[in-house]
Structures are given as structure tokens and as C-alpha cells.
Image: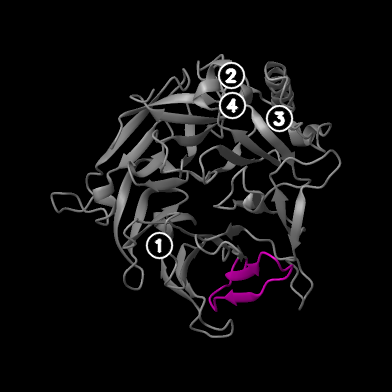
């Protein structure tokens, strides 16, 4: 069922209004103490402190969330941010909500990190395991990539003071030239829970077994030359998708869309092929691809573009249509989801959510009238009630995620916002949010 408005039930907005991350960390510490005082019978895990607390060149910036992931049971949300922080938020149960402090700006319940950890380097990319849950230690982790360091499996479970959060490390050094090959994308596919894929420079894809330090297979495209031949993303699929075709879809910042047949040997020229290159006039680098639930179409998002390209996935990945946006995506990645209720869901640059009906998405962008969506995009706008008082004031929703727990009676969404990159520091931080994480539910939900 589509909704024209959503109610913001939980938010971090007042926390992330601080100009510097140092102030954000102090606010989170204060909120943690308040929650601990309210529940003295339960010892909450202490929030870790960053190694960069005293480094002004690092902390003199607002916090921006880079990735959001719901747990599979819908009880928590994991975020990765530009302050090298990994946070896990416990979603309060309904019968305890009256004890949670209200956000002074939105009136919603205030989200306080249950777990806060820090990596010692900036994070290039991350992947939280799709089966993660606070109640299942095996999959409660996130994979993190940084420059000049191995990929690290970070444990999201509470640790004793002084214990390392690193469960396992994966080598990224090329043994032929001893260069460290930085992963720019990491992907764990549904039903491949013990394997992950990384994308790097030179159109190179590596396959790792979770239990082994070195990659088990390595593929690359013969066309992988140039500074933008970086595998930027793999196709996003439904968590219920059964992977039986053994073909992955990859894309890079040169606007190439290609396929990898993992049944082929790494030295087989048929294994990894570029299928189509989107003209540079249509965008500057692919950063996300989503498969429709019926697995017929692939929706491709690019930087510096006002269109979402649509490919026919049933053939050789031919472009067939596009969705027109009411704004132009910049260099900040604005990630979308394909939702079983709302259809295609994407945040706007005006503090709202845009949605295209599921029937249109599963028909490759063809309207009910039979015409293509190029001329008149049939999108709807979802407003967010109680989010903040500056909607439309350079507040961009750049991440959105759906609660995967289909047993829940309330369809919840998590999203992150950030201010315009040209934010003027002279503007009062109380009127212009830098970044926030919020959870929203339909207005008719209790």
C-alpha cells in the first residue's frame, strides 16, 4: 500500500546538528549516560572513543552517514559514517518508548547508539552482512575497506574493554607487484553467506571465502584501462532472491555495465564481459544498480544525472527506457531501494521521498497507458511529518532502507539526510541540519 506521508518516529537529528564531530561524540556520550541512568539494572555497552578525538583536521566537519543496514529481524540498524564510526542502534520496543528521551527538534523519540566503534582509518566502502542480528553473533559483523590496509571483518557485538573488534582480516596485496589493491565496493549476495566479492581498479573483481585470508578467485575485464575503470558496485537484489543463475552484474565509473559468470575459470575470456557503456552525457559514473523483484529489469543510477536508466535483464543487458527525476543527482551518492509496497523509492534534495509505483517498475518504466515514462515520470512524493522544520532548505535524503522483517505489522523505513555540500557555516546550526538518521512509519500506524 502506498502512503503519501510518513511519520518520523525516531530520529538523531538534534545530535547531528553539531558542526564538528567532536561535539557529536560528546552528545552521544551524554545521551548514553542518560539512558543508563533510566535503566540502572541493565549495563549498556560503553561507547568507544575515536583515536582522532584530538585531531582538529579530522574532526572539524559534520558527520555524514555513508551506509545504512537494517538487521534481518528489524530490531537494530547499523550505520557507517565519515567519522570512521560504526554505530548500531537498537530500535526501542513499543512498551518502552515512553522512557526514551524526545528529540527536542522533531518531537520524535531520540535514537542513541547501542554500539559505537571506530576504525583507525577512513572507510572507503563497507558491507554489513545481510543476515546480521544482535541476537546472532555469527553474522553480526560488517566488512570494512580502507586504503593501505587489509579488508577487516568488524564485530558488531559488545566487546570487553581493551578487546579488538577485528574478527578477521583479508589480504589485498597483489603478489606479482606487491601493490595494495584497494576495494572500492564490497558485496555479499543473498544465499551466498560465506562468500563476498570486491571491486577494484582495472575492472578487477576478487572473490573471498569468509574463512580464508586470501582471495580464492580473481577476474578482470580486458577493457579495464584508465583511471575510472573502477568496479563501483554490484547489482542489489531482494533478500528473498534465490541466486541460481550464477551471473553477477557489475558496473564501473566509466559507465560500463557488465556480467561476471562465476562458473567460468578466472582466465576464461568469457567470464567477465562489458555489455554496454552509457554515454558520458547521461551521467558521470554508475554507483548503484537494483534488480526489479520480477528479475526482468535493472535500474541504474549515475552521478551527475537526472535520469535512472533501465536495462532489460532477460537478454544481454540492453537499455530500454529511463525514469526522469525532478532534480539532478550530484557527486554525492543518493541510493534507492525497490520496495514491495512503495515500488522504487529514492530520497530527493528537498527533504522528501519520491516513489514510482511497483507496477511501473515491474514493467520496465512503461505506464499503464502503454507509453514510456520518459516524457512524464509518474512519481509520487512522500512527505515526512515531524522530521524537521527546514524541509526544502538544501536537505538531501541520500540513503533509504526498508525494514526486512516482513512479520512486522508496521512497515518501517530508515533514511539518512545531509545538507547541501555548499553549506555556509555562518548559517545557524539550529536551523540547518547537517545529517540525521531517522525511522519513519505510515501515518496511520500507532
Instruction: Using a 10 Å C-alpha cutoff, classify the residue at mark 3 as few (fewer than 14 neighbours), some (14 to 19) or many (20 or more).
Output: many
Residue interval drawn in magenta: 201-226
Q: Please give the name of the residue rendered at 72% of the width and 17% of the height, measured from the top-left corner.
A: 37
Counting residues from the start of the chain, the first of labels 2 and 1 encountered is 2
What kind of secondary structure does the magenta stretch mostly adopt?
A: loop
For the residues labelled 4 and 1, the Cα–Cα distance comes to 43 Å
Give whichever of 301, 155 is nearer the camera.
Answer: 155
Q: To which residue does mark 4 refer? A: 111
Report the side of 22 relative to 227 (left or right).
Answer: right
N-term mark: 4 or 1: 4
Instruction: Check disc 2: other Cα within 10 Å, few if <14, some if 14-19, many if 20+.
Output: some
Give the numbered dot on residue 100: 2
Q: What whole-number distance in Å separates the C-alpha atoms at marks 4 and 3?
A: 17 Å
Instruction: Find residue 244 and report its image quarter.
Output: bottom left
- Image coordinates of residue 131 in percent, x first then y, are 55, 52
The question of residue 86 being in magenta is answered with: no
Query: Magenta span has 220?
Result: yes
Distance, label 1 to label 3, CA atoms, is 39 Å
Which residue ends up furthest to the bottom in the rendered image? Answer: 268
Q: Which mark is residue 21?
A: 3
Amino acid at each position: 500500500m502506498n502512503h503519501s506521508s510518513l511519520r518520523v518516529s525516531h530520529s538523531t537529528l538534534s545530535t547531528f546538528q553539531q558542526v564538528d564531530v567532536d561535539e557529536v561524540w560528546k552528545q552521544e556520550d551524554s545521551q548514553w549516560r542518560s539512558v543508563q541512568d533510566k535503566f540502572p539494572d541493565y549495563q549498556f555497552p560503553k561507547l568507544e572513543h575515536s583515536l582522532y578525538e584530538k585531531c582538529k583536521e579530522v574532526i572539524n566537519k559534520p558527520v555524514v552517514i555513508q551506509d545504512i543496514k537494517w538487521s534481518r529481524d528489524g530490531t537494530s540498524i547499523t550505520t557507517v559514517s565519515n567519522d570512521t564510526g560504526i554505530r548500531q542502534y537498537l530500535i526501542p520496543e513499543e512498551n518502552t518508548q515512553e522512557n526514551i528521551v524526545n528529540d527536542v527538534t522533531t518531537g520524535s523519540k531520540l535514537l542513541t547508539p547501542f554500539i559505537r566503534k571506530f576504525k583507525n582509518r577512513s572507510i572507503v566502502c563497507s558491507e554489513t552482512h545481510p543476515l546480521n542480528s544482535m541476537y546472532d553473533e555469527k553474522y553480526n559483523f560488517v566488512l570494512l575497506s580502507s586504503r593501505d590496509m587489509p579488508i577487516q571483518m568488524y564485530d558488531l557485538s559488545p566487546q570487553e574493554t581493551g578487546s579488538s573488534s577485528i574478527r578477521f582480516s583479508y589480504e589485498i596485496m597483489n603478489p606479482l607487484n606487491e601493490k595494495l589493491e584497494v576495494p572500492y565496493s564490497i558485496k555479499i549476495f543473498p544465499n551466498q553467506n560465506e562468500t563476498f566479492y570486491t571491486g577494484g581498479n582495472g575492472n578487477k573483481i576478487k572473490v573471498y571465502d569468509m574463512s580464508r585470508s586470501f582471495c580464492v578467485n580473481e577476474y578482470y575485464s580486458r577493457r579495464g584501462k584508465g583511471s575510472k575503470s573502477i568496479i563501483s558496485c554490484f547489482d542489489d537484489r531482494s533478500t528473498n532472491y534465490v541466486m541460481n543463475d550464477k551471473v553477477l552484474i557489475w558496473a564501473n565509473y566509466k559507465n560500463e555495465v557488465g556480467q561476471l559468470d562465476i562458473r567460468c575459470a578466472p582466465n576464461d575470456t568469457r567470464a567477465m564481459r562489458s555489455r554496454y557503456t552509457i554515454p558520458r552525457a547521461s551521467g558521470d559514473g554508475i554507483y548503484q544498480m537494483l534488480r526489479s523483484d520480477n528479475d526482468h529489469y535493472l535500474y541504474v543510477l549515475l552521478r551527475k544525472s537526472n535520469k535512472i536508466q533501465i536495462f532489460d535483464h532477460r537478454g544481454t543487458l540492453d537499455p530500454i527506457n529511463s525514469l526522469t527525476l525532478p532534480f539532478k543527482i550530484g557527486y554525492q551518492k543518493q541510493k534507492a531501494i525497490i520496495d514491495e509496497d512503495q515500488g522504487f523509492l529514492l530520497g530527493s534534495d528537498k527533504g522528501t521521498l519520491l516513489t514510482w509505483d511497483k507496477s511501473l517498475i515491474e514493467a520496465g518504466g512503461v505506464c499503464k497507458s502503454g507509453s514510456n515514462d520518459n516524457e512524464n515520470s509518474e512519481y509520487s512524493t512522500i512527505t515526512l511529518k515531524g522530521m524537521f522544520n527546514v524541509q526544502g532548505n538544501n536537505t538531501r535524503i541520500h540513503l533509504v532502507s526498508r525494514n526486512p522483517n516482513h512479520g512486522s505489522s508496521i512497515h518501517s523505513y530508515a533514511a539518512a539526510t545531509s545538507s547541501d555540500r555548499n553549506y555556509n557555516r555562518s548559517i545557524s546550526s539550529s536551523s540547518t541540519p547537517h545529517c540525521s538518521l531517522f525511522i519513519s512509519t505510515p501515518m496511520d500506524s500507532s
